[in-house]
Amino acid sequence: MIININNNMENPNTVTIQKEWERQLQQTGSRLTEPRRAILKVITESDHPLTPIQIYDQARQSEPYLGLVTVYRTIEILENLHLIDRIHNLGQCQTIFRGTSGHQHLLTCTQCGSSVHFEGLLAEAQFEEIAAFNGYKISGHWLQLYGLCQQCLKEEHEN
Amino acid sequence: MIININNNMENPNTVTIQKEWERQLQQTGSRLTEPRRAILKVITESDHPLTPIQIYDQARQSEPYLGLVTVYRTIEILENLHLIDRIHNLGQCQTIFRGTSGHQHLLTCTQCGSSVHFEGLLAEAQFEEIAAFNGYKISGHWLQLYGLCQQCLKEEHEN
DNA sequence: ATTATTATTGATATTGATTATCATTATCAT
DNA sequence: ATGATAATGATAATCAATATCAATAATAAT
C-alpha cells in the first residue's frame, strides 16, 4: 500500500504543523521569535524543497528585517529536531564518484567514505507504480545506503 | 540476486577503465592531455567519492602544475559522458524540505520542484540484506524519485 | 506588571568553493 | 613539421556559508 502524506499548501493541517514545530522549539529550550515564526511558516507551507536564500526571500515578505544568518541558524535547529531534511538536487552536489552506467546504486561508509556499487534491487519495479499513484511520471531515481564498512565495524569493536 | 561491482584499487580492471574513459573522451572530440590523464587516474582508481579539492590534491602528486579549474572542467566533461555521478553526502546539501519523521521518501518534479513524500516502499527490507552481502552494517538510507508532476506533464503536452 | 537574565538577532567581516576571463601552451588533423 | 584551436593555469570575480559582536527581545523570577 502506498500512502500519500500531507504535502500541499491547501492542506488545512499546515497551521497545526507550524504550531507543533513551535511547541517543539519551546520544549527543547529555544525561544519563539517573530523571525523564527516567519521561517517556520515558509517551510511548513511549502510543497517545494527550498534553498536558504529562497526561504530568506519568502520570509522577508512578512518579516522585512530578517537576516540570512537567522535562516541558517533556524535550519540548523530544525534539522537537529529532525523536523526538516536536506534534499539532494540532481547535478548540484560536488562529491564525485565514478558511475557505472546502468542501474546500480551506492552503499557508502559514513566513517571512512569507502563505497561500492550494487545492483539487483527489487524495488525498482515499484518506483513507477508509486509515482503514478501520485500523478508523477518518473525519469530517474537516486538511492544511497549509509552504514559502516567491514573495516570500520571492526575498528569500532576494538575501542 | 545481488551483484557486487568492481570497486577497489586492487581490481586489475582499473587500468582498463581508465583506457576506456580516455577512448570515450577522444571519440567525443575531447583532447587527451596529461592533466586529464592524471584526473582520470585518481577518479577511476578511488573507491571513495571525492570532492574536487581532493581530486586536485591527489592528482597533483603526479601532475604538480595542475590547476583546480581543470579539475572542475574535467568533472563536467565526465559527467556529460555519464562516466561519473555526483554523490549525495548526508548533511551537506543545502536544500531544505520539511521531513516526516518515519520512513517516508521523496518524489520530486524536475520541472517545477513540487514534491511529495510517500511510504510503503517494499524495498526497505532488502536494504540490510544488500549491505550485509557487501560487509556493511546499515544505519540509514536516502531515496528520491525524480520525474514530472501532473501539472508539468500537462503543460508539456500543450507545447 | 517589572525587571534581570540571556538567548537571539542582524550587521559586518571572513572564509572558502565555484565560475569567468584571458594570454599562453599543447594536442592533433593535415 | 605545421597550423588551427582546444585546453591549460593564473588571476579575478562571484556567491554561499560561517564567525564575530554589540544591540535587542523573549522568558523566568520577582
Image (spheres, coloured by chain):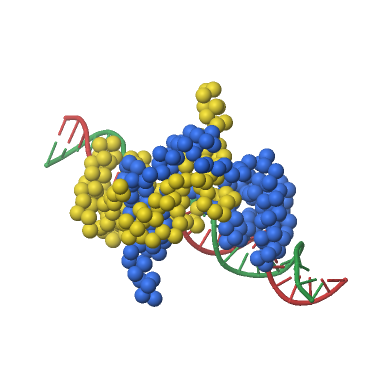
Chain colours: A yellow, B blue, C green, D red
- Going 36% across and 40% down the picture, which residue do you hit? A80
Q: Nearer the viewer, residue A42 or B115?
A: B115
Work out whether B117 lies above or below D6: above
Q: Nearer the viewer, residue B54 or D24?
A: B54
Q: Nearer the viewer, residue A146 or D26?
A: A146
Q: Position of residue B44 (x, y in %)?
A: 65, 49
Q: Position of residue B74 (x, y in %)?
A: 63, 58
| Quadrant assignment, res A31 | top left
Left or right relative to A66: residue B44: right
Left or right relative to D30: residue C23: right
| Quadrant assignment, res B23 | bottom right
Q: Nearer the viewer, residue B75 or C11?
A: B75
| Quadrant assignment, res B77 | bottom right
- Going 57% across and 46% down the picture, which residue do you hit? B49
How many numbered marks appear? Answer: 0
Which corner quadrant holds the C terminus of chain B? bottom left
- Going 40% across and 41% down the picture, which residue do you hit? B124
**Residue B19 visible in the snapshot:** yes
Q: Residue furthest top?
A: A158
Work out whether A148 lies above or below A18: above
